[in-house]
Image: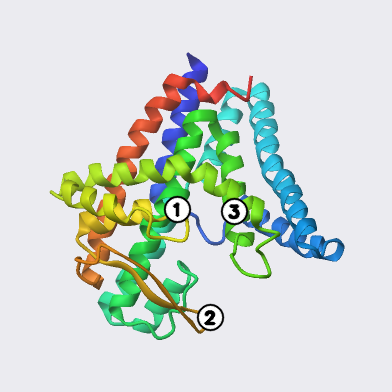
């Protein structure tokens, strides 16, 4: 019973900490270390491999080393800490779970864009949006910035919060750390261009596989959260029509659900490194997002997050995932 109380309370404490402080920019964060390691292997692999097949093999090896290392280190740290002392184990578990959740940090970045737009500081809003999306934000107007912030909010709600909670419920911090490492690899290597098509092949495909269920669960939670605002049926209709309107097999699910609930139009033309890319439109009958819609989106995001936490907290307790890879 003591172990149950320790681990379930650790998850609750980690979620509360994430909501309150997110990812303080000056705090050391293992994901940044992961990014440094990925960059090191990226550059190093190109010294030995040049062919597409060789780069694919290098990408597979990088994935095994980075994701496997994240999983193994989590197991070692948790097991060792709990064997030394239960309180020390609890502290380590809170920290590991906390760094795996990114809901608070996502909220903070999107809120900044909203605040800058409301105050009329469009330049800072553009800089804030550039922290969220890879598209060019330098010439965006209010509608473009609002759309970018909202699309990022709901696309990243899946891989930044719901997916980690999902894997925590299944296998505790170690399994969620494995997912987080794969997701980081995909964000750094999974570009569909000539430079990364081969090296990022395995990280991208594995991330698509791991995100398959969480992205769809996220859409369901968004619909349930939207039912409190009378948007369930509208969201369901848009989701059924537009769930596949994205390059990624997963990203359009939460975006389409949110677009329907909020009655907003997502997608459309954007510039990436100066090149115009015409993405499919999600919810073509919706209105163009405005600054005031970001606040509505943030409310929907937090209701979604709370619903997801309640379910996965219960499953974490019932599945006893905290001991799957530890004892």
Numbered circles on residues, count: 3
Instruction: Identify the residue position indicated by label 2 in the image.
Output: 273
Residue 250, given in percent of the width and then of the height, sits at 44, 51
Q: Classify 10 Å Cα crowding around label 3: few (below 14), some (14-19), many (20 and above).
A: many
**Residue 28 can be seen in this image:** no
Tell me the quarter of the picture where residue 266 sits: bottom left
Whole-number angstrom distance, CA of label 3 to CA of label 2: 21 Å
Whole-number angstrom distance, CA of label 1 to CA of label 2: 30 Å
Residue 27, given in percent of the width and then of the height, sits at 57, 56
Residue 35: assigned label:
none
Residue 112 or 64: which is nearer the viewer? 64
Residue 204: assigned label:
3
Q: Nearer the viewer, mark 1 or mark 2?
A: 2
Indicate the secondary structure of the residue bearing disc 2. loop
Residue 22: assigned label:
1
Please give left or right for residue 281 compared with residue 139 in the image: left
| 1 or 3: tag closer to the N-terminus | 1
Residue at left 85%, top 65%? 47
Asked if residue 24 is positioned above or below residue 324 in the image, the reply reads below
Residue at left 62%, top 69%? 193
Residue 322, given in percent of the width and then of the height, sits at 54, 25
Question: What scheme was used to colour the molecule?
Answer: rainbow
């Amino acid at each position: 019973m003591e172990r149950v109380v320790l681990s379930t309370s650790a998850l609750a404490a980690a979620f509360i900490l994430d909501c309150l402080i997110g990812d303080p920019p000056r705090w050391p964060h293992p994901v940044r270390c992961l990014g440094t390691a990925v960059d090191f292997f990226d550059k190093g692999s190109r010294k030995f491999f040049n062919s597409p097949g060789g780069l694919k093999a290098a990408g597979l090896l990088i994935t095994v080393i980075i994701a496997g290392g994240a999983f193994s280190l989590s197991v070692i740290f948790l097991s060792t800490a709990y064997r030394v002392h239960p309180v020390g184990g609890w502290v380590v578990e809170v920290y590991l779970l906390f760094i795996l959740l990114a809901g608070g940090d996502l909220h903070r970045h999107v809120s900044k864009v909203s605040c800058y737009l409301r105050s009329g500081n469009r330049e800072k809003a553009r800089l804030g949006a550039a922290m969220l999306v890879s598209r060019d934000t330098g010439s965006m107007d209010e509608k473009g910035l609002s759309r970018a912030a909202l699309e990022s909010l709901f696309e990243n709600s899946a891989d930044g919060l719901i997916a980690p909670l999902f894997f925590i419920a299944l296998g505790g911090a170690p399994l969620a750390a494995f997912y987080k490492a794969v997701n980081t690899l995909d964000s750094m290597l999974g570009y569909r261009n000539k430079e990364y098509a081969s090296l990022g092949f395995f990280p991208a495909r594995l991330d698509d596989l791991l995100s398959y269920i969480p992205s769809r669960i996220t859409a369901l939670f968004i619909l349930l959260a939207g039912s409190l605002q009378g948007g369930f049926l509208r969201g369901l209709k848009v989701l059924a029509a537009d769930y596949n309107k994205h390059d990624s097999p997963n990203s359009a699910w939460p975006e389409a659900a949110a677009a329907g609930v909020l009655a907003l139009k997502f997608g459309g033309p954007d510039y990436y490194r100066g090149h115009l890319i015409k993405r499919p439109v999600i919810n073509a009958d919706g209105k163009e997002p405005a600054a005031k819609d970001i606040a509505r989106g943030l409310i929907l995001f937090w209701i979604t997050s709370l619903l997801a936490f309640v379910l996965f907290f219960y499953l974490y307790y019932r599945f006893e995932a905290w001991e799957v890879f530890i004892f």
